Image (cartoon, helix red, strand yellow):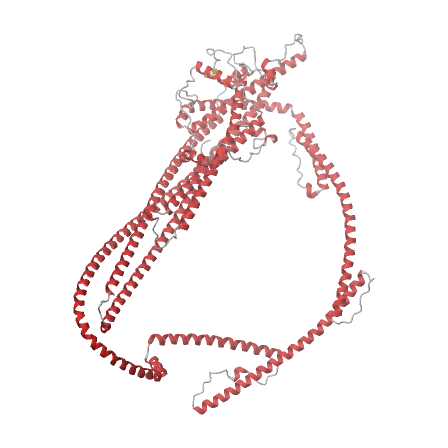
Amino acid sequence: MNGANTRRGGDGFTQGSRLPPPAVQPPPSTGPSAKALVEGYRKDILIGFDQEKPRYNPLNPERPQSSALVDLKDPIQVHLLTETALLDSKKFEILSQEEVDGLKKQIQSLTMRVEQARTNLAIQSKYRDAAISMARLYSPAKSEGKRRSLLGNRMSDSVKEAEMEKQASERRCEELATELFTLEKRLVEPQRRLLQHTAGILQMTHRAAARKFGQPAAGQPMMNGIPGSPESLYTYSNARNSLEATSEDADFDDRSLYLPLDQMDGQPGRPRKNTIEIPTKSPVREQQNQLREEMDRAKDEISRLQAVERQLKEENWKLKKAEEESTTEKIQSGALEKKLKDENTRLKEAQQQLKSEADELRAQTGDQRSSISNAEQKLEAMNNKLREVVVTFSPAKNNDFGYPEVAVGSGSTLKSQLEYLERGIATAMEEQRLHATKTSRESEEVSAAAAAATASLAKAESRIKALSRQTQDVLQKAKITQPPAESEATLVGQLNYIENALSVFQTELASSGKKNIAQVDAVLMGLWDIIQTGYSEIQQQRIERKKLRSEKGVVDDDDDDVSGDEIGDMNEKYSLQAFSTKVQWLYAQATSLREQKSVLKRQIKQQRELNNKSGSEKDEDMRAMEDELETTRAMLDESERTAQDAMDRLGLTLRNMETLQKTNAANESASFSSSKTIQDQLKDRNTKIAALESSNQNVQAKLADAETNLASVKAQLSQASESQTATQAEAGKLAKAVKDKDEELDRLNMMVIELKTEVAFAKAELDGAYGSRKQRAAEVAALSKTSETSELNTQVQNLRSELENTLKDLEDITKESIAAEKEKLDLESKLDDALSSKASLESEIKTLRDKLDAEVSRLQEQLDAERLKAPTSSAGGSAGGAGSSRAGASMLSEQFRATMKEERKKFQEELREEQARRRKIEDELRALRKSQGLSSRSTTNLGSSLSPR
């Protein structure tokens, strides 16, 4: 129905058939669950929701998309299928044109929503798979369930976040699957009604051929045993319960299309033949015969054009199917081109003949058109004046009131001019009524405003009286003598009283301001005297200090204090400017002194640091000078006490010496054997530590290899993304080219439709002026092809070849995008494997490091225990030797602990750097997946928009 939009609105809808699509309702409680829907759509998501390819049967060249089990060349099989289809579609509902358009619009809207839901579900499924992979990556291994690493449970937040993302993605997938299921379920009902309507219409208009299959009309091609000429349409019956062939005299009557179905079945509405015939010589009979012949010829021509239009639609549909299936295109291209050429030739030849006839008809109808044109112009002028009147009523409201259509002189705007006149008169009456209503409303508003003004004036008077009372109270509190206001004074009197009170207030404020200024001046003069006195005292102190320094022979430092010139004149009198200058100078002096203080503090601090670090002789002398006496006395006292203690201990030591010499020999033999055993154990531990370090190096080498593989995978991903971007750009160019070709094809289709319309009007005029249709058909067949038709055929062939090339390019791009998508999935799987291997290597490294730390700490404890083991039988005389050995062991232990602390700190820093690198890689992976998800979404949308319809 290519002409549906031209018959009604631009969108193919009438006003009554605009049915808004209802909101998506949730599926019934008895339907499948959301998880079951997601699992059901999994296979469709993997294949991209591609439709099942139509069947192909090379045995039926006229309809190759039929089943392989049917043979359309078999008349018996075709007859059985036809009878079965007619019988099955007998009870189907037949809809009106508006209902059909509404169903088509609803199907189109639902189809678009279904495609969008499928695209969103496919993209969200990829997000869900990525979230599952991330959750699997973050989840700890089973072997690490009872062991905690040095970092504790720092990965728990990442695990929770990944789990939440996975749950959100799964929930979104379930919602989209439910929505898609609901939309597909809603789409089935309008499709079923439309298909039943189509089958019912075809069942009603189908009629068996009146002629035999073996006697086709001369020059008419046969299609499945049925003549394909337009006049064969009138050899069938129109009853829905009529499946048998009719007789030749049962011609089709176009008036039966406007009869109800109950009259069509039994044919009660057919006009009976009049038994009393009109005389042969009667002019009325001649006129009726002529009119009847003209009507018959017009109907025949219209029916033939309708048949041609249907045939063109079928050819267009076959052309689109040929674009989808390249193999079937070669079979049908010859027949389609031949039929298109013949049809274009006939249309052009008929157009050339009809142009001359149309000129003659235009000359005959010139007078009628002139009168119609005058009437249109008068109506246009009247409507313009009426519009001016309507706009004058309300310029702001009716400024957008439309202008009448311009009279073209053909009578086509008479109806619109009359409708505009009626609408303008109704609008003028409505504006007049509104104007009267507005006038009465304005008078009411004026009276209400006057009452409101009176009330507001009374309120104002009361407020002014209250204000005057408050003013009088304020004057009394301020002890200002002012006569009170009169209680019965008018509004003007009250205002005068308030003005007088305000003037009194201003006078009092001025006097109080002068008093305040005098007080401020007195305070400032006092401060000035204090400052001058302070400076004079400072000057006297400077003079006395200079005298003392000169008496002691110390060189006077002129830069020590502030000079007298900087202080200023001591005898300067007070003025506001001098006081301001003095205050500014004091502020500058305080600021500079504060800065000098900070500089001195910083210098003193630096000097102290230098003195502490240098350890110079000056520092030692200062300390010696400060603490020399007290230290010397303390040392003398302590030396005396130490000497006395030493004498006592010497006797005890001499007594214990003999015992120690005896036990020392036995201890030396035992310690030699134990030290040898400890050295052997240390050698074994060192061997184990070396083995652990070598295994650690191997693990680090594996980790480096994994990082190298990850870098290569990233490079491959970047190359794939670049190739995908280039493919998308090329697809965009091809889509633009296809769009241009489609627009050009639509333009040509519109030209064909316009030519058909002109041909239909011209045929109707031609039938009234010339002979029968058969004679004109013979004349048209005798004419040769014109150059314009050949050019159009050449242009059509060029467009077909360009469209074929474009479709081939589009198929190549689609294949490349699919291959790129598969390659991207492979790279993602490789990347997941690399990340999992990296995680396992990191867990192994953590395990080995923990084992290494535990082993080293255990060995250190054993070593410390062996070294710090004291002889049980040693006496107090060996305190010096034991103290020295104990000090050496403690020093070694502290050095070892410091070394281990440094190693642990270094390991923790390396582990933090490794985790930072891993987080960075994961962030880059997320960004890459998001960008690839968006690109795949755009590719999917592009593929759906460029898919051949």
Camera-side residue of 598 and 55: 598
Q: What x and y, as percent, mark residue 263?
A: 61, 15
Camera-side residue of 605 and 575: 605
Locate residue 111 relative to residue 717 in the image: left or right: right
Camera-side residue of 15 and 281: 15
Q: Is the residue 592 above or below the residue 392 in the image?
A: below
Q: What x and y, as percent, mark residue 98?
A: 58, 27
In the rendered image, is residue 669 in sight? yes
Residue in the picture at 79% in, 56% down:
458
Residue at the extreme right of the image, as rendered: 488
Camera-side residue of 358 and 529: 529
Q: What x and y, as percent, mark residue 760?
A: 57, 23
Q: Is the residue 483 above or below the residue 67 in the image?
A: below
Locate residue 183 relative to residue 464 in the image: left or right: left
In the rendered image, is residue 747 in sight? no
Locate residue 800 relative to residue 538 in the image: left or right: left
Locate residue 463 relative to residue 856 in the image: left or right: right
Q: What x and y, as percent, mark residue 885?
A: 23, 69
Q: Is the residue 167 above or below the residue 233 in the image?
A: below
Which quarter of the picture shows residue 96?
top right
